[in-house]
Amino acid sequence: MSTTEQEPPRLYAAREPIFPRRVKGKFRSLKWVLMAVTLGIYYITPWIRWDRGPGLPDQAVLVDLANRRFFFFWIEIWPHEFYFVAGLLIMAGLGLFLFTSALGRVWCGYACPQTVWTDLFLMVERWVEGDRNAQIRLYEQGWDARKARLRAVKWAAWLLIGLLTGGAWVFYFADAPTLLRDLVTGHGHPIAYSTIAIMTGTTFFFGGFAREQICIYACPWPRIQGAMMDEDTLTVAYREWRGEPRGKIAKGEATKSDSPAGLKGDCIDCLACVHVCPMGIDIRDGQQLECITCALCIDACDDVMARIGKPRGLIDYMALKDEHAEKTGQEGDSLWRHVLRPRTLLYFTLWSAIGVGLIVALFLRSPYDLNVSPIRNPLYVTMSDGSIRNTYELRLRNKQGEEKTFAVGVSDARGAPLTGLELALEGSEGTVTVAQDATYEQRVYLTAPAGSVLADGAQTGLVLWIEDVESGRRAAVDTVFQGRGR
Protein backbone atom coordinates (compact mmCIF):
# COMPACT_ATOMS: atom_id res chain seq x y z
CA MET A 1 0.00 0.00 0.00
CA SER A 2 1.41 3.36 -1.03
CA THR A 3 2.33 5.75 1.74
CA THR A 4 1.77 8.73 -0.51
CA GLU A 5 -1.04 10.84 0.85
CA GLN A 6 -3.94 11.16 -1.54
CA GLU A 7 -5.85 14.38 -1.89
CA PRO A 8 -9.40 13.94 -0.54
CA PRO A 9 -12.13 14.25 -3.16
CA ARG A 10 -13.61 17.70 -3.49
CA LEU A 11 -17.32 18.20 -3.02
CA TYR A 12 -17.31 21.33 -5.12
CA ALA A 13 -15.27 22.29 -8.19
CA ALA A 14 -14.74 25.88 -9.21
CA ARG A 15 -16.72 26.81 -12.29
CA GLU A 16 -15.02 26.68 -15.65
CA PRO A 17 -16.79 28.97 -18.14
CA ILE A 18 -18.71 27.08 -20.81
CA PHE A 19 -19.37 28.56 -24.25
CA PRO A 20 -21.87 26.32 -26.08
CA ARG A 21 -21.80 26.52 -29.87
CA ARG A 22 -24.94 27.39 -31.82
CA VAL A 23 -26.59 24.31 -33.31
CA LYS A 24 -29.55 23.63 -35.58
CA GLY A 25 -31.79 20.60 -35.58
CA LYS A 26 -35.15 19.23 -34.55
CA PHE A 27 -34.39 19.18 -30.84
CA ARG A 28 -32.98 22.71 -30.88
CA SER A 29 -36.13 23.84 -32.72
CA LEU A 30 -38.29 22.08 -30.15
CA LYS A 31 -36.44 23.88 -27.36
CA TRP A 32 -37.01 27.25 -29.09
CA VAL A 33 -40.73 26.56 -29.34
CA LEU A 34 -41.02 25.46 -25.70
CA MET A 35 -38.99 28.46 -24.55
CA ALA A 36 -41.30 30.84 -26.43
CA VAL A 37 -44.43 29.12 -25.09
CA THR A 38 -43.31 28.93 -21.45
CA LEU A 39 -41.94 32.48 -21.34
CA GLY A 40 -45.03 33.75 -23.13
CA ILE A 41 -47.30 32.09 -20.58
CA TYR A 42 -45.26 33.47 -17.68
CA TYR A 43 -45.06 37.07 -18.92
CA ILE A 44 -48.53 37.42 -20.49
CA THR A 45 -50.80 35.55 -18.04
CA PRO A 46 -51.07 38.37 -15.40
CA TRP A 47 -52.42 40.70 -18.09
CA ILE A 48 -55.30 38.47 -19.18
CA ARG A 49 -58.61 39.96 -18.05
CA TRP A 50 -61.60 37.93 -16.81
CA ASP A 51 -64.93 39.55 -15.94
CA ARG A 52 -66.28 38.16 -12.66
CA GLY A 53 -68.83 40.86 -12.01
CA PRO A 54 -68.83 43.93 -9.76
CA GLY A 55 -66.74 43.82 -6.61
CA LEU A 56 -64.46 41.02 -7.80
CA PRO A 57 -61.03 41.23 -9.47
CA ASP A 58 -61.03 41.03 -13.26
CA GLN A 59 -57.58 39.43 -13.51
CA ALA A 60 -57.73 35.90 -14.93
CA VAL A 61 -55.00 34.49 -12.66
CA LEU A 62 -54.55 36.15 -9.29
CA VAL A 63 -53.21 35.05 -5.91
CA ASP A 64 -55.16 37.44 -3.68
CA LEU A 65 -53.24 37.17 -0.40
CA ALA A 66 -55.09 40.10 1.19
CA ASN A 67 -58.44 38.33 0.86
CA ARG A 68 -56.94 34.84 1.08
CA ARG A 69 -58.24 33.61 -2.26
CA PHE A 70 -56.83 32.25 -5.51
CA PHE A 71 -58.50 33.05 -8.83
CA PHE A 72 -57.87 30.98 -11.94
CA PHE A 73 -60.15 32.08 -14.77
CA TRP A 74 -63.63 30.88 -13.72
CA ILE A 75 -62.33 28.96 -10.69
CA GLU A 76 -62.08 30.54 -7.24
CA ILE A 77 -60.21 28.71 -4.48
CA TRP A 78 -60.81 29.66 -0.84
CA PRO A 79 -58.38 28.95 2.04
CA HIS A 80 -60.36 25.95 3.29
CA GLU A 81 -60.14 24.48 -0.23
CA PHE A 82 -56.36 24.28 -0.22
CA TYR A 83 -56.68 20.57 -0.96
CA PHE A 84 -57.06 21.60 -4.61
CA VAL A 85 -53.58 23.17 -4.51
CA ALA A 86 -52.20 20.14 -2.65
CA GLY A 87 -53.72 17.87 -5.29
CA LEU A 88 -52.11 19.88 -8.09
CA LEU A 89 -48.73 19.67 -6.35
CA ILE A 90 -49.10 15.90 -6.03
CA MET A 91 -50.02 15.70 -9.72
CA ALA A 92 -46.93 17.74 -10.58
CA GLY A 93 -44.74 15.33 -8.59
CA LEU A 94 -46.28 12.26 -10.19
CA GLY A 95 -45.99 13.89 -13.60
CA LEU A 96 -42.29 14.44 -12.98
CA PHE A 97 -41.91 10.78 -11.99
CA LEU A 98 -43.84 9.72 -15.10
CA PHE A 99 -41.78 11.72 -17.58
CA THR A 100 -38.49 10.83 -15.91
CA SER A 101 -39.32 7.13 -15.93
CA ALA A 102 -40.22 7.29 -19.61
CA LEU A 103 -37.82 9.90 -21.05
CA GLY A 104 -35.19 10.62 -18.42
CA ARG A 105 -34.53 14.22 -17.41
CA VAL A 106 -36.75 15.62 -20.16
CA TRP A 107 -38.14 18.22 -17.71
CA CYS A 108 -34.62 19.49 -16.99
CA GLY A 109 -33.70 19.68 -20.65
CA TYR A 110 -36.78 21.43 -21.98
CA ALA A 111 -39.08 23.06 -19.41
CA CYS A 112 -37.17 23.71 -16.16
CA PRO A 113 -37.09 27.50 -15.46
CA GLN A 114 -33.32 27.33 -14.97
CA THR A 115 -32.94 25.79 -18.44
CA VAL A 116 -35.42 28.15 -20.11
CA TRP A 117 -33.86 31.33 -18.72
CA THR A 118 -30.32 30.04 -19.34
CA ASP A 119 -31.26 29.44 -22.99
CA LEU A 120 -32.59 32.99 -23.16
CA PHE A 121 -29.39 34.38 -21.62
CA LEU A 122 -27.25 32.32 -24.02
CA MET A 123 -29.23 33.67 -26.97
CA VAL A 124 -28.56 37.24 -25.80
CA GLU A 125 -24.89 36.40 -25.25
CA ARG A 126 -24.53 35.14 -28.83
CA TRP A 127 -26.28 38.22 -30.23
CA VAL A 128 -23.88 40.51 -28.40
CA GLU A 129 -20.55 38.63 -28.41
CA GLY A 130 -20.87 36.17 -31.28
CA ASP A 131 -20.75 32.38 -31.34
CA ARG A 132 -18.49 30.04 -29.36
CA ASN A 133 -15.10 30.92 -30.86
CA ALA A 134 -15.71 34.66 -30.62
CA GLN A 135 -16.80 34.29 -27.00
CA ILE A 136 -13.67 32.30 -26.12
CA ARG A 137 -11.41 34.89 -27.73
CA LEU A 138 -13.21 37.68 -25.89
CA TYR A 139 -12.94 35.80 -22.58
CA GLU A 140 -9.20 35.17 -22.96
CA GLN A 141 -8.20 38.66 -24.10
CA GLY A 142 -7.47 41.50 -21.73
CA TRP A 143 -9.90 44.24 -20.89
CA ASP A 144 -10.19 47.02 -23.46
CA ALA A 145 -12.90 49.43 -24.60
CA ARG A 146 -14.53 46.87 -26.93
CA LYS A 147 -14.69 44.12 -24.29
CA ALA A 148 -16.07 46.53 -21.69
CA ARG A 149 -18.72 47.75 -24.15
CA LEU A 150 -19.83 44.22 -25.09
CA ARG A 151 -19.96 43.09 -21.48
CA ALA A 152 -21.91 46.19 -20.45
CA VAL A 153 -24.46 45.63 -23.23
CA LYS A 154 -24.80 41.94 -22.37
CA TRP A 155 -25.17 42.51 -18.64
CA ALA A 156 -27.66 45.33 -19.22
CA ALA A 157 -29.78 42.98 -21.35
CA TRP A 158 -29.56 40.29 -18.65
CA LEU A 159 -30.62 42.78 -15.99
CA LEU A 160 -33.56 43.85 -18.13
CA ILE A 161 -34.65 40.22 -18.48
CA GLY A 162 -34.28 39.79 -14.72
CA LEU A 163 -36.32 42.94 -14.10
CA LEU A 164 -39.10 41.71 -16.38
CA THR A 165 -39.00 38.34 -14.63
CA GLY A 166 -39.36 39.84 -11.18
CA GLY A 167 -42.00 42.28 -12.40
CA ALA A 168 -44.09 39.51 -13.95
CA TRP A 169 -43.89 37.53 -10.70
CA VAL A 170 -45.35 40.28 -8.49
CA PHE A 171 -48.14 40.91 -11.02
CA TYR A 172 -49.59 37.53 -10.09
CA PHE A 173 -50.31 38.85 -6.57
CA ALA A 174 -52.07 42.14 -7.37
CA ASP A 175 -54.01 43.76 -10.18
CA ALA A 176 -51.33 44.04 -12.86
CA PRO A 177 -52.24 47.42 -14.47
CA THR A 178 -52.74 49.07 -11.08
CA LEU A 179 -49.53 47.65 -9.65
CA LEU A 180 -47.54 48.67 -12.73
CA ARG A 181 -48.79 52.25 -12.41
CA ASP A 182 -47.90 52.31 -8.71
CA LEU A 183 -44.44 50.87 -9.36
CA VAL A 184 -43.66 53.39 -12.10
CA THR A 185 -44.92 56.37 -10.08
CA GLY A 186 -43.09 55.27 -6.93
CA HIS A 187 -46.23 54.43 -4.96
CA GLY A 188 -45.77 50.66 -4.94
CA HIS A 189 -45.54 48.70 -1.70
CA PRO A 190 -41.99 48.13 -0.41
CA ILE A 191 -42.57 44.36 -0.54
CA ALA A 192 -43.23 44.64 -4.28
CA TYR A 193 -40.00 46.56 -4.87
CA SER A 194 -37.95 44.20 -2.70
CA THR A 195 -39.44 41.12 -4.39
CA ILE A 196 -38.62 42.51 -7.83
CA ALA A 197 -35.07 43.31 -6.69
CA ILE A 198 -34.53 39.79 -5.34
CA MET A 199 -36.00 38.17 -8.45
CA THR A 200 -33.92 40.41 -10.72
CA GLY A 201 -30.72 39.60 -8.86
CA THR A 202 -31.28 35.85 -8.70
CA THR A 203 -32.31 35.63 -12.36
CA PHE A 204 -29.25 37.67 -13.40
CA PHE A 205 -26.91 35.51 -11.33
CA PHE A 206 -28.45 32.07 -11.95
CA GLY A 207 -28.93 32.53 -15.70
CA GLY A 208 -25.78 34.49 -16.37
CA PHE A 209 -23.06 33.23 -14.06
CA ALA A 210 -24.20 30.08 -12.18
CA ARG A 211 -25.95 28.25 -15.04
CA GLU A 212 -24.84 24.60 -14.93
CA GLN A 213 -23.69 25.01 -11.31
CA ILE A 214 -27.32 25.34 -10.23
CA CYS A 215 -28.13 22.04 -11.95
CA ILE A 216 -25.11 20.24 -10.53
CA TYR A 217 -24.95 21.53 -6.95
CA ALA A 218 -28.18 23.33 -6.03
CA CYS A 219 -30.83 21.14 -7.64
CA PRO A 220 -31.62 17.83 -5.89
CA TRP A 221 -33.23 16.23 -8.93
CA PRO A 222 -30.01 14.85 -10.52
CA ARG A 223 -29.54 12.73 -7.40
CA ILE A 224 -33.17 11.59 -7.33
CA GLN A 225 -33.47 10.72 -11.01
CA GLY A 226 -31.48 7.51 -10.59
CA ALA A 227 -34.33 5.98 -8.61
CA MET A 228 -36.82 7.01 -11.31
CA MET A 229 -34.92 5.52 -14.26
CA ASP A 230 -34.40 1.90 -15.29
CA GLU A 231 -33.07 -0.02 -18.29
CA ASP A 232 -36.21 0.81 -20.29
CA THR A 233 -35.94 4.59 -19.81
CA LEU A 234 -35.26 6.49 -23.02
CA THR A 235 -32.41 8.92 -22.52
CA VAL A 236 -29.64 10.54 -24.55
CA ALA A 237 -26.82 8.04 -25.10
CA TYR A 238 -23.84 7.33 -27.34
CA ARG A 239 -23.76 4.11 -29.38
CA GLU A 240 -20.29 3.12 -28.32
CA TRP A 241 -20.41 -0.17 -30.20
CA ARG A 242 -20.81 1.80 -33.42
CA GLY A 243 -18.62 4.82 -32.72
CA GLU A 244 -15.47 3.20 -31.31
CA PRO A 245 -12.60 3.25 -32.02
CA ARG A 246 -12.68 6.92 -32.83
CA GLY A 247 -10.56 8.49 -35.51
CA LYS A 248 -10.49 10.41 -38.72
CA ILE A 249 -12.04 8.58 -41.65
CA ALA A 250 -10.53 8.72 -45.13
CA LYS A 251 -12.83 9.27 -48.07
CA GLY A 252 -14.43 5.99 -49.09
CA GLU A 253 -13.14 4.16 -46.02
CA ALA A 254 -15.55 1.58 -44.57
CA THR A 255 -16.64 1.84 -40.97
CA LYS A 256 -18.83 -0.23 -38.68
CA SER A 257 -21.99 1.32 -40.08
CA ASP A 258 -20.96 0.25 -43.61
CA SER A 259 -19.74 -3.24 -42.87
CA PRO A 260 -19.41 -5.45 -39.80
CA ALA A 261 -15.80 -5.88 -40.83
CA GLY A 262 -15.09 -2.18 -40.60
CA LEU A 263 -12.20 -1.58 -38.22
CA LYS A 264 -12.98 2.03 -37.39
CA GLY A 265 -16.04 3.43 -35.69
CA ASP A 266 -18.25 6.17 -37.09
CA CYS A 267 -17.13 8.73 -34.52
CA ILE A 268 -14.54 11.05 -36.08
CA ASP A 269 -13.79 12.69 -32.72
CA CYS A 270 -14.85 16.13 -34.00
CA LEU A 271 -16.04 17.16 -30.50
CA ALA A 272 -19.19 18.72 -31.98
CA CYS A 273 -21.28 17.02 -29.28
CA VAL A 274 -19.06 18.52 -26.58
CA HIS A 275 -19.00 22.03 -28.03
CA VAL A 276 -22.80 22.36 -28.10
CA CYS A 277 -23.42 20.91 -24.62
CA PRO A 278 -24.63 23.61 -22.18
CA MET A 279 -23.27 21.49 -19.31
CA GLY A 280 -19.81 21.12 -20.89
CA ILE A 281 -19.73 17.30 -20.70
CA ASP A 282 -18.84 14.60 -23.21
CA ILE A 283 -21.83 12.30 -23.71
CA ARG A 284 -19.44 9.66 -25.09
CA ASP A 285 -18.19 9.08 -21.56
CA GLY A 286 -21.56 7.52 -20.65
CA GLN A 287 -24.40 8.63 -18.41
CA GLN A 288 -23.41 11.48 -16.10
CA LEU A 289 -25.10 13.40 -13.33
CA GLU A 290 -24.60 16.66 -15.23
CA CYS A 291 -26.51 15.56 -18.35
CA ILE A 292 -29.93 17.23 -18.62
CA THR A 293 -30.89 15.27 -21.79
CA CYS A 294 -31.46 18.44 -23.82
CA ALA A 295 -30.48 16.42 -26.93
CA LEU A 296 -28.46 19.23 -28.52
CA CYS A 297 -25.60 16.74 -28.88
CA ILE A 298 -27.93 14.61 -31.02
CA ASP A 299 -28.52 17.53 -33.40
CA ALA A 300 -24.78 18.25 -33.61
CA CYS A 301 -23.80 14.62 -34.21
CA ASP A 302 -26.57 14.00 -36.76
CA ASP A 303 -25.36 17.02 -38.71
CA VAL A 304 -21.80 15.65 -38.79
CA MET A 305 -22.96 12.16 -39.77
CA ALA A 306 -24.97 13.62 -42.65
CA ARG A 307 -21.91 15.53 -43.89
CA ILE A 308 -19.64 12.48 -43.94
CA GLY A 309 -22.30 10.22 -45.41
CA LYS A 310 -22.91 8.04 -42.34
CA PRO A 311 -26.27 7.04 -40.80
CA ARG A 312 -27.69 9.37 -38.20
CA GLY A 313 -28.25 8.18 -34.63
CA LEU A 314 -24.69 7.72 -33.36
CA ILE A 315 -25.93 9.78 -30.43
CA ASP A 316 -29.63 9.29 -29.90
CA TYR A 317 -32.49 8.78 -27.47
CA MET A 318 -32.20 5.13 -26.53
CA ALA A 319 -32.65 2.74 -23.61
CA LEU A 320 -29.95 0.71 -21.89
CA LYS A 321 -31.79 -2.45 -22.90
CA ASP A 322 -31.61 -1.43 -26.56
CA GLU A 323 -27.89 -0.77 -26.32
CA HIS A 324 -27.26 -4.33 -25.14
CA ALA A 325 -29.50 -5.72 -27.90
CA GLU A 326 -27.84 -3.68 -30.65
CA LYS A 327 -24.38 -4.83 -29.60
CA THR A 328 -25.45 -8.39 -30.37
CA GLY A 329 -26.94 -7.45 -33.72
CA GLN A 330 -30.58 -7.46 -32.60
CA GLU A 331 -33.14 -4.70 -32.95
CA GLY A 332 -34.18 -2.69 -29.91
CA ASP A 333 -37.72 -2.44 -28.65
CA SER A 334 -40.13 0.06 -30.17
CA LEU A 335 -40.71 3.49 -28.66
CA TRP A 336 -44.16 2.56 -27.37
CA ARG A 337 -42.86 -0.58 -25.68
CA HIS A 338 -40.47 1.57 -23.67
CA VAL A 339 -43.08 4.19 -22.82
CA LEU A 340 -46.07 1.91 -22.16
CA ARG A 341 -44.84 -0.42 -19.48
CA PRO A 342 -46.16 -1.26 -15.98
CA ARG A 343 -44.17 1.43 -14.18
CA THR A 344 -45.21 4.32 -16.40
CA LEU A 345 -48.78 3.06 -16.62
CA LEU A 346 -48.95 3.00 -12.81
CA TYR A 347 -47.71 6.60 -12.60
CA PHE A 348 -50.18 7.66 -15.30
CA THR A 349 -53.05 5.89 -13.55
CA LEU A 350 -52.30 7.58 -10.22
CA TRP A 351 -51.84 10.93 -11.95
CA SER A 352 -55.12 10.57 -13.82
CA ALA A 353 -57.02 9.39 -10.74
CA ILE A 354 -55.98 12.46 -8.76
CA GLY A 355 -56.84 14.73 -11.69
CA VAL A 356 -60.28 13.20 -12.13
CA GLY A 357 -60.86 13.42 -8.36
CA LEU A 358 -60.00 17.13 -8.36
CA ILE A 359 -62.29 17.83 -11.31
CA VAL A 360 -65.17 15.94 -9.68
CA ALA A 361 -64.60 17.76 -6.38
CA LEU A 362 -64.47 21.07 -8.23
CA PHE A 363 -67.84 20.57 -9.90
CA LEU A 364 -69.52 19.04 -6.84
CA ARG A 365 -68.43 21.68 -4.35
CA SER A 366 -71.20 23.81 -2.88
CA PRO A 367 -71.46 27.48 -3.92
CA TYR A 368 -71.76 28.34 -0.23
CA ASP A 369 -70.37 26.97 3.02
CA LEU A 370 -72.11 26.68 6.38
CA ASN A 371 -70.46 26.37 9.77
CA VAL A 372 -72.35 26.17 13.07
CA SER A 373 -70.65 26.45 16.48
CA PRO A 374 -72.70 25.96 19.68
CA ILE A 375 -72.01 28.53 22.42
CA ARG A 376 -70.48 26.52 25.27
CA ASN A 377 -70.56 29.11 28.03
CA PRO A 378 -73.23 28.56 29.19
CA LEU A 379 -74.36 25.30 27.56
CA TYR A 380 -77.98 26.39 27.85
CA VAL A 381 -80.15 29.07 29.46
CA THR A 382 -83.33 28.36 31.46
CA MET A 383 -85.97 30.92 30.58
CA SER A 384 -88.59 32.34 33.00
CA ASP A 385 -91.26 29.96 31.69
CA GLY A 386 -89.02 26.89 32.20
CA SER A 387 -88.09 26.50 28.54
CA ILE A 388 -84.45 25.78 27.55
CA ARG A 389 -82.59 27.94 25.05
CA ASN A 390 -79.35 27.08 23.19
CA THR A 391 -77.28 29.65 21.30
CA TYR A 392 -75.25 29.01 18.13
CA GLU A 393 -72.85 31.02 16.01
CA LEU A 394 -73.76 30.53 12.36
CA ARG A 395 -71.09 31.42 9.79
CA LEU A 396 -72.27 31.44 6.18
CA ARG A 397 -69.95 32.02 3.22
CA ASN A 398 -71.49 32.98 -0.12
CA LYS A 399 -68.97 32.05 -2.81
CA GLN A 400 -71.10 33.28 -5.70
CA GLY A 401 -70.76 36.50 -7.63
CA GLU A 402 -74.14 37.89 -6.55
CA GLU A 403 -75.99 38.71 -3.33
CA LYS A 404 -78.05 35.79 -1.94
CA THR A 405 -80.88 35.51 0.59
CA PHE A 406 -81.12 32.35 2.70
CA ALA A 407 -83.82 30.91 4.92
CA VAL A 408 -82.62 29.21 8.13
CA GLY A 409 -84.31 26.12 9.53
CA VAL A 410 -83.87 23.21 11.91
CA SER A 411 -84.81 19.51 11.69
CA ASP A 412 -84.01 16.25 13.42
CA ALA A 413 -81.23 13.95 12.28
CA ARG A 414 -83.54 12.32 9.71
CA GLY A 415 -84.55 15.65 8.20
CA ALA A 416 -88.05 15.79 9.71
CA PRO A 417 -89.26 19.10 11.26
CA LEU A 418 -88.95 19.43 15.04
CA THR A 419 -92.31 20.43 16.46
CA GLY A 420 -92.31 22.81 19.37
CA LEU A 421 -88.72 23.94 18.85
CA GLU A 422 -88.60 27.68 18.29
CA LEU A 423 -85.89 29.16 16.06
CA ALA A 424 -85.00 32.84 16.21
CA LEU A 425 -82.29 34.88 14.51
CA GLU A 426 -80.67 37.82 16.21
CA GLY A 427 -81.91 40.92 14.40
CA SER A 428 -83.53 38.98 11.54
CA GLU A 429 -86.95 37.66 10.59
CA GLY A 430 -86.00 34.09 9.66
CA THR A 431 -83.82 34.95 6.64
CA VAL A 432 -80.31 36.28 6.19
CA THR A 433 -78.84 38.15 3.22
CA VAL A 434 -75.20 37.58 2.35
CA ALA A 435 -73.28 39.83 -0.02
CA GLN A 436 -71.49 38.38 -3.02
CA ASP A 437 -68.24 36.56 -2.34
CA ALA A 438 -68.45 37.33 1.39
CA THR A 439 -68.79 35.65 4.79
CA TYR A 440 -71.69 36.47 7.09
CA GLU A 441 -71.95 35.69 10.82
CA GLN A 442 -75.31 35.36 12.57
CA ARG A 443 -76.35 34.30 16.10
CA VAL A 444 -79.12 31.69 16.17
CA TYR A 445 -81.35 30.82 19.16
CA LEU A 446 -83.17 27.49 19.58
CA THR A 447 -85.73 27.25 22.40
CA ALA A 448 -87.40 24.01 23.57
CA PRO A 449 -90.59 24.28 25.69
CA ALA A 450 -90.56 23.11 29.31
CA GLY A 451 -91.31 19.43 29.70
CA SER A 452 -90.37 18.52 26.13
CA VAL A 453 -87.96 15.75 25.25
CA LEU A 454 -85.37 18.28 24.06
CA ALA A 455 -85.58 20.35 27.24
CA ASP A 456 -85.39 17.41 29.62
CA GLY A 457 -82.88 15.31 27.62
CA ALA A 458 -79.14 15.46 28.10
CA GLN A 459 -78.04 15.99 24.51
CA THR A 460 -80.07 15.62 21.32
CA GLY A 461 -78.73 15.59 17.77
CA LEU A 462 -80.30 17.91 15.23
CA VAL A 463 -79.57 19.58 11.90
CA LEU A 464 -79.33 23.29 11.17
CA TRP A 465 -79.74 24.14 7.50
CA ILE A 466 -79.87 27.10 5.18
CA GLU A 467 -81.77 27.25 1.91
CA ASP A 468 -81.19 29.55 -1.04
CA VAL A 469 -84.53 31.33 -1.39
CA GLU A 470 -84.08 31.72 -5.16
CA SER A 471 -82.79 28.29 -6.19
CA GLY A 472 -83.95 26.13 -3.27
CA ARG A 473 -80.48 24.64 -2.85
CA ARG A 474 -79.61 23.63 0.70
CA ALA A 475 -76.58 23.23 2.93
CA ALA A 476 -76.80 21.58 6.35
CA VAL A 477 -74.63 21.00 9.41
CA ASP A 478 -75.11 18.48 12.21
CA THR A 479 -75.10 19.89 15.73
CA VAL A 480 -76.63 19.15 19.16
CA PHE A 481 -79.18 20.66 21.55
CA GLN A 482 -78.19 20.68 25.22
CA GLY A 483 -81.01 20.00 27.74
CA ARG A 484 -81.15 19.79 31.53
CA GLY A 485 -80.18 16.13 31.34
CA ARG A 486 -82.95 14.61 33.55
Image (cartoon, helix red, strand yellow):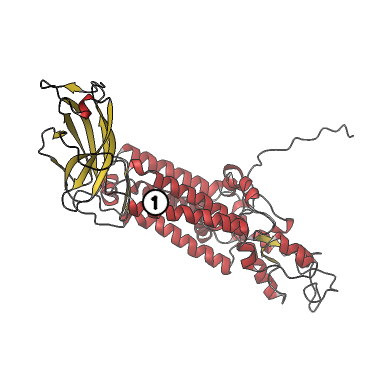
Viewer-side residue, 394 vs 45: 394
Image check: 379 left or right of 192? Answer: left
Which amino acid, by three-letter code, is at mark 1?
A: Leu
Q: Position of residue 273 (x, y in %)?
A: 67, 62
Q: Quadrant of the N terminus?
A: top right
Q: Position of residue 231 (x, y in %)?
A: 70, 57
Q: Which residue is mark 1?
A: 164
Residue at image x 34%, y 41%? Answer: 79
Viewer-side residue, 287 vs 78: 78
Whether residue 328 is visible: yes
Q: Position of residue 249 (x, y in %)?
A: 79, 72
Q: Quadrant of the C terminus?
A: top left
Quarter of the image where one finds residue 81: top left
Viewer-side residue, 464 vs 303: 464
Q: What is the crowding at mark 1: few (fewer than 14 residues within 10 Å), some, or many (at least 20)?
A: some
Residue at image x 16%, y 52%? Answer: 470
Above or below 369: residue 127: below
Above or below 224: residue 130: below
Image check: 28 left or right of 418? Answer: right
Image check: 54 left or right of 147? Answer: left
